[in-house]
Image (cartoon, rainbow, N blue to C red):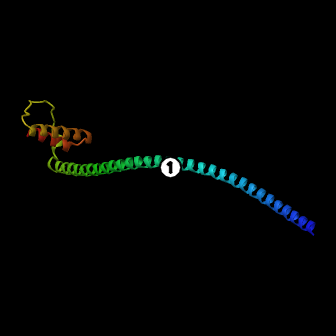
Amino acid sequence: KAEGQLADLRKAETNTQHNYDMLKQSLSDQLKFDNKDMEDEKASKAAAEEAKATAEGDLQATLTELASVTKALETARASCMTAAANHEESMASRSEELKALAEAEKILKETSEGAVSQTYSFVQVGSTMRSRADLARSEVLTMVRRLAKQQHSAALAQLASKISAL
């Protein structure tokens, strides 16, 4: 009977030893795989952090460029608005000038219908410019003469003659 118990105990001890070896092998394999997974995760984390740092750098560069482009856009917009306002003023002034010239031409045609048969002379009698008004009159006279020549208008030529007589 003691031998039977000894054999049973040895068999139980062998089974326990076998179970222990199997558990040890299983835990060793699990540890090895977990360590490999951990190394893979560390590598993935490092790659993700590098990608994040690159993306943050790109974001900063993009934000800087956006600010620069936005400033340039505002400058261009302001310049455009100024140019548009200047153009509107210029067009309004030109329109007023054209109206004044049309009115002057109309008046000239009405007041100098018989002036076509008169002769004109370009002899300068003397210089009598003494003030700004004389200078302005001289400039107006020059402009009316130039306009008369360009338009081949006898009425404007008559007006120039009358202006020079004043």
- Please report the residue visible at 74 percent of the width from the left and 55 percent of the height from the top: 28
- Please report the residue visible at 49 percent of the width from the left and 46 percent of the height from the top: 57
Dot 1: element: helix
User: Please, is residue 106 above or below residue 142 in the view?
Assistant: below
The quadrant of the image that shows the N terminus is bottom right
Q: Residue furthest bottom?
A: 1
User: Please, is residue 72 above or below residue 10 in the view?
Assistant: above
The quadrant of the image that shows the C terminus is top left
- Please report the residue visible at 18 percent of the width from the left and 49 percent of the height from the top: 104
Q: How many labels does the image show?
A: 1
> Which is nearer the eye, 43 or 23?
23
> Which is nearer the eye, 62 or 52?
52
Q: From the viewer's perspective, tell me whether residue 51 is left or right of residue 155.
A: right
Q: From the viewer's perspective, tell me whether residue 42 is left or right of residue 134.
A: right
Q: Residue furthest front?
A: 2
Q: Where is residue 116 in the image (x, y as percent from the top left)?
A: 18, 42
- Please report the residue visible at 75 percent of the width from the left and 55 percent of the height from the top: 29
> Which is nearer the eye, 87 or 26?
26
User: How busy is the neighbourhood of tag 1: few (under 14 within 10 Å), some, or many (20 plus)?
Assistant: few
Residue 10, located in which quarter of the rendered image?
bottom right
Q: From the viewer's perspective, tell me whether residue 120 is left or right of residue 52.
A: left
> Which is nearer the eye, 10 or 71?
10
Q: Where is residue 103 in the image (x, y as percent from the top left)?
A: 19, 51
Identify residue type, mark 1: Glu
Q: Position of residue 119 (x, y in %)?
A: 16, 36
Q: From the viewer's perspective, tell me whether residue 75 is left or right of residue 111.
A: right
Q: Where is residue 130 in the image (x, y as percent from the top left)?
A: 6, 34
Q: Dot 1 corresponds to which residue? A: 56
